[in-house]
Image (spheres, helix red, strand yellow):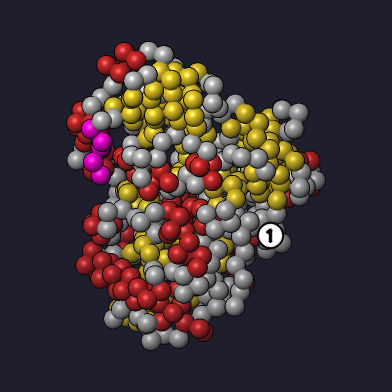
């Protein structure tokens, strides 16, 4: 198949032509034709750490639950306890299979007393929606809608993000705390969902605007213009990946999947086992009863020269294979080569010396604490 | 960026500048542009022998690893050590940033390499524009 023919079968966000006009390098990401970088991955990564960057994340999916049984449905589907959310608050959660592994990780937003929005991953959209309908679709009192194609979702991220977005809205952004949201007028559009969320480890916002092309392009360009004084850069999926990796956030298909359970992925703090039954709970209780998981996700930092990458094997110092890297990359801000990897618990203590097999060579690395990068809150 | 006409090229996007029985090897501007920000190079040691069409090292950007293929066979006489600390020089100027120098063991291998014009055509066919 030619590149042009392959591209035509891919899905596009409303900003596809805008990305191409900016001469972005485009890639197939989970069936989507998405920008991987514009001016360069490192520059984009640094813009988000030190200034501000703009991402098109419209490929993410959105499932809305409405009706009196919505809380019960969300709490049956997801491991975190949505009853703890106030209206206008969001939290990290996940949908699990009965065996305690991941359908997907999600951000749950409480829109009103009987109204929840789940933001889900792009590559798992169809699977997630089927899973939701199969699992809670028959519950009386909740109406489930897939709004994935209704929104263009923009992420404005970085220490200058609030200053940039404040120029485009009369909503006082300083009143929105981390992982809270509100509705406000943005770029002349009324009732835009403005959430103080993101996937970069920085302060920032995600806004949900109508997905028609002219509106999407207009708002995109207005954000870039508002950010020009701070050196804003459009950022692609390449920087999105290195930013989330420095912050040790999970990526579906890498750190979490249908063969990884919640405790292995170090996400047990988001599983509220005491909230009542939910899909996957029994399996998690069994893992706990058995004394915890056999393997754990750890942070690695390369000690010797070399870059551990996704899928590379982790070795004990005697050379035998003990695990595998789920995500590995140079870290542009930290200027180190870092990775997340599954290793047996006996190799998970901080400062444990291990090696990574790089093209047949054992290259030394050590277990370090995560997140690799933590922003200093102001 | 234009491809120097006094170099020869591989379909794996390396260039070689030949001077008698000496060769200087780097990667093309198309290769550096496809890779993105280069952060790491792994090159052979001086004295190593390398064989045409076989890998002699690798170059890594933030997001990808790419093998380096020898345009011609020979013995490594010099390695650009600057690239250990400043691999991004390859992004800045791929045409003049060399990786290794060789004493060529089979100079007639040059006949199988691409000219600048042929390479440019090859790249435009590969990318479809």
Q: Position of residue A37 (x, y in %)?
A: 37, 53
What is the secondary structure assignment of the residue under circle 1?
helix
Secondary structure mainly formed by the magenta segment: loop
In this rendered view, identify the residue nearer to me: B44 or A310.
B44
Based on the displayed image, in which of its 4 quarters is residue B19 positioned? top left
Q: Position of residue A66 (x, y in %)?
A: 44, 68
Q: Identify which residue is drawn at 25% across, 37% down.
A: B3
Q: Identify which residue is drawn at 28% across, 17% down.
A: B112
Q: Identify which residue is drawn at 58% across, 73% down.
A: A85
Based on the displayed image, in which of its 4 quarters is residue A150 positioned? bottom left
> Callout 1: 10 Å neighbours few (<14), some, many (20+)?
few
Left or right: A364, with A13 as reference point: right
Give the magenta range: B1-5
Q: Identify which residue is drawn at 19% across, 40% down.
A: B129
Asked if residue A113 shows in the view, the reply is no
Q: Position of residue A331 (x, y in %)?
A: 55, 52
Based on the displayed image, in which of its 4 quarters is residue B16 positioned? top left
The residue where tag 1 is placed is A269
Asked if residue A22 shows in the view, the reply is yes
Mark 1 belongs to which subunit?
A
Q: Position of residue B23 (x, y in %)?
A: 38, 25
Give the answer, above or below, for where A246 lies relative to A203.
Answer: above
- In the picture, the quarter occupied by the N terminus of chain B is top left
Give the answer, above or below, for where B6 lies relative to A369.
Answer: above
Magenta stretch: includes residue B92: no
């Amino acid at each position: 198949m030619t590149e042009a023919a392959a591209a035509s079968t891919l899905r596009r966000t409303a900003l596809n032509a805008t990305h191409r006009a900016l001469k972005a390098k485009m890639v197939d990401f989970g069936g989507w034709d998405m920008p991987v970088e514009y001016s360069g991955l490192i520059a984009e990564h640094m813009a988000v750490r030190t200034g501000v960057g703009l991402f098109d994340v419209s490929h993410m999916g959105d499932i809305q639950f409405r009706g009196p049984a919505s809380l019960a449905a969300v709490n049956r589907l997801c491991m975190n306890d949505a009853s703890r959310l106030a209206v206008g608050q969001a939290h990290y959660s996940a949908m699990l299979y009965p065996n305690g592994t991941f359908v997907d990780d999600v951000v749950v937003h409480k829109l009103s007393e009987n109204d929840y929005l789940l933001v889900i991953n792009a590559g798992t959209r169809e699977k997630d929606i089927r899973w939701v309908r199969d699992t809670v679709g028959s519950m009386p009192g909740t109406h489930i809608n897939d709004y994935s194609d209704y929104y263009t979702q923009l992420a404005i991220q970085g220490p200058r993000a609030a200053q940039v977005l404040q120029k485009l809205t009369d909503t006082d952004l300083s009143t929105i705390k981390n992982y809270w949201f509100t509705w406000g007028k943005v770029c002349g559009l009324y009732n835009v969902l403005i959430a103080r969320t993101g996937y970069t480890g920085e302060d920032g916002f995600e806004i949900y605007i109508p997905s028609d092309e002219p509106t999407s392009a207009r708002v995109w360009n207005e954000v870039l213009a508002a950010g020009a004084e701070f050196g804003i850069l459009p950022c692609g999926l390449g920087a999105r990946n290195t930013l989330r990796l420095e912050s040790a956030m999970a990526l579906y298909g890498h750190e979490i999947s249908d063969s990884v359970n919640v405790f292995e992925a170090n996400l047990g703090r988001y599983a509220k086992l005491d909230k009542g039954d939910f899909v996957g709970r029994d399996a998690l209780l069994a893992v706990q009863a058995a004394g915890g998981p056999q393997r754990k996700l750890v942070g690695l930092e390369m000690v010797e020269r070399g870059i551990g990458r996704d899928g590379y094997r982790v070795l004990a110092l005697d050379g035998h294979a003990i695990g595998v890297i789920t995500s590995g990359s140079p870290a542009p801000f930290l200027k180190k080569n870092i990775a997340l990897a599954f290793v047996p618990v006996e190799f998970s203590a901080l400062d444990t010396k291990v090696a990574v097999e790089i093209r047949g060579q054992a290259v030394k690395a050590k277990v370090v604490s995560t997140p690799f990068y933590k922003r200093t809150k102001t | 960026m234009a491809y120097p006409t006094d170099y020869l090229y591989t379909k794996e996007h390396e260039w070689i500048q030949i001077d008698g029985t000496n060769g200087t090897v780097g990667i093309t501007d198309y290769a550096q542009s496809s890779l993105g920000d280069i952060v790491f190079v792994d090159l052979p040691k001086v004295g190593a022998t390398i064989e045409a069409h076989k890998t002699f090292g690798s170059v890594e950007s933030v997001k990808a690893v790419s093998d380096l293929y020898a345009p011609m066979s020979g013995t490594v006489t010099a390695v650009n050590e600057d690239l250990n600390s400043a691999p991004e020089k390859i992004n800045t100027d791929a045409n003049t940033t060399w990786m290794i120098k060789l004493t060529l063991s089979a100079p007639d291998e040059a006949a199988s390499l691409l000219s600048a014009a042929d390479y440019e055509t090859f790249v435009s066919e590969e990318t479809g524009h």
